[in-house]
Image (cartoon, helix red, strand yellow):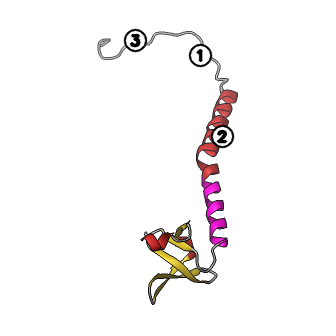
């Protein structure tokens, strides 16, 4: 019957489990890496976008997230009237603004 069950062999004493400080240190290092590589740059981009939206004024040329190019015709608390052609205006949310273009960009488009 010994061929079905292997014999147990005694081993030396188990090593003490004292890796708690190293584990906490490693978790701290991983959190620091995640903070500086992901969280901080994302917060910086959000802050820059908010400042850009606050600085918008009538006559600015912008591009929306959907790729619509137009000139700001009016600004509300949460919406922007965007002139995209002669006598054609649309309303878009302020958050949809992707970037502000230099003056005169629409003449070339």
State which tag comes first along the sequence, 3 or 1: 3
Q: Nearer the viewer, mark 3 or mark 2?
A: 2
Tag 2 near tag 1, CB within 8 Å: no
> Residue 108's x, y, as percent?
44, 70
What is the secondary structure assignment of the residue under circle 3? loop
The residue lying furthest to the right in this view is 21
State which tag comes first along the sequence, 2 or 1: 1
What is the crowding at mark 2: few (fewer than 14 residues within 10 Å), some, or many (at least 20)?
A: few
The stretch in magenta equals: 42-55
Give the side of residue 6 with respect to residue 58, left or right: left
Residue 14: image tag: 1
Q: Which residue is mark 2?
A: 32
Residue at image location 56% in from the left, 67% down from the top: 102
Q: Nearer the viewer, mark 3 or mark 1?
A: 1
- Kindly report the distance in space between the C-alpha atoms of the residues bearing marks 2 and 1: 34 Å
- Kindly report the distance in space between the C-alpha atoms of the residues bearing marks 3 and 2: 48 Å
What is the secondary structure assignment of the residue under circle 2? helix
Residue 7: image tag: 3
Give the side of residue 109 with respect to residue 99, left or right: left
């Amino acid at each position: 019957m010994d061929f079905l069950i292997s014999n147990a062999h005694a081993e030396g004493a188990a090593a003490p489990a004292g890796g708690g400080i190293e584990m906490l240190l490693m978790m701290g290092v991983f959190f620091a890496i995640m903070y500086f590589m992901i969280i901080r740059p994302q917060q910086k981009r959000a802050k820059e976008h908010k400042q850009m939206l606050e600085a918008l004024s009538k006559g600015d040329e912008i591009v929306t997230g959907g790729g619509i190019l137009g000139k700001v015709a009016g600004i509300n608390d949460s919406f922007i009237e965007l002139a995209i052609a002669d006598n054609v205006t649309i309303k878009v949310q302020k958050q949809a603004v992707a970037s502000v273009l230099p003056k005169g960009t629409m003449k070339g488009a």
